Image (spheres, grey):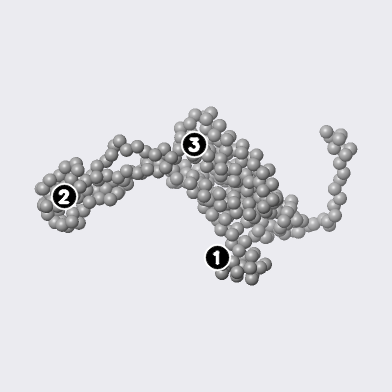
Amino acid sequence: MGIVFLIFTKNKKIEAAPKTINQVFTPLKSIRVWRFGLYYFLVFGSFVTFSQWLLPNFLNVYHTTLVMGGIFAAIFSLPSGVIRAYGGFLSDRFGARKVMYWVLSSSVVLSFLLMFPKMDITTSGSGITAAKAGTVTEVSNDKIVIGDKTYPIIQEDKNAAHSKFFPSKKSWQQVVVEQNQQVQKKDLLAEGITQIHFEANIWIYLVLVILIGSAWGIGSAAVYKHIPDYFPNEVGVVGGMVGLLGGLGGFVGPIIFGYLLSTTGFWTSSWMFILAVSLICLIWMHRVVVNLMKEKSPEFAKDMDRKH
């Protein structure tokens, strides 16, 4: 192959004049470069981070075996990597900006769905207070009687089934007064208890993870589609910086996720971070598009404002 390469390839002619170091790095002063870098920090850095983070996530949250957790992590990584070529096709056909709108919007929605942890929470609910002062004449599991007033008590349904796919709750009340006790108006008779249960089904979680990983894969191609359009003569240095920021995301991501986990105690705190970054990227890009529209087509922008 080396001999074939030497025989049939030709050296590219350098048409542009050589640049100084300062000239080479001048594009890095543009805020647009750092905006693209933030996009790539999200779509590529997050992909790299979760390729490492999902295995301990599955082991700790869903108690999978090491082999099964590794398979699930691979199922996330493979489509995300392969689909980048399709992301390039979509960017050529529909435009990189439109594709990034899809990608960032998908990242916001999916990370929002993924940030809810597997949980079983017991908290205060709706209780019962005395409508008037009096003496408690009767207390049972299902009612409290004060004079001529009867207060029904909601009992715990221990046979209630939990949903495997959606959050579910059950509420009941627990008596806190005794027979012959004197109570005043608005005194608490029975405290309310609410229990919220969310299974965070592993298969739904896996599907959502694959979808957001695929969106990031498409976004990785769309980010690089922007570069030659805005920096046709500085593709190398701008592409290198954007790639650096994406790689930095893959490096610092596990560190950030580790601190979030130790601080909050939630494995899904990583998805809360992704939601925040996705919102920042989406809002920033939308503001740039709106400002660009007003600058390039002020009459069209005014017409859009009137209609919407």
Residue 275 horizontal/vertical position (percent): 52, 50
Outermost residue, front side: 307
Q: Earlier in the sequence, mark 1 or mark 2?
A: 2
* Three-letter amino acid code at the position of disc 1: His
Q: Give residue 243's position: percent from left, percent from top.
A: 67, 48
Structural crowding at the residue carrying mark 1, measured as other residues with C-alpha within 10 Å and reported as few (<14), some (14–19) or many (≥20): few
Q: Residue at x 25, y 50 (%)?
A: 127
Q: Can residue 233 be seen in the rendering of this structure? A: yes
Q: Residue furthest right?
A: 7
Give residue 203's mark: 3
Which residue carries the number 2 mark?
Answer: 150
- Residue under label 1, please give it: 308
SS state under label 1:
loop
Q: Are marks 3 and 1 in contact (CB under 8 Å)?
A: no
Secondary structure beneath disc 2? strand
Residue 132 location, quadrant: bottom left
The residue mark sitting in front, 3 or 1, is 1
Please tell me which residue is depicted at 59% across the width and 66% down the height of the picture.
304
Left or right: 143 as drawn, with respect to 231: left
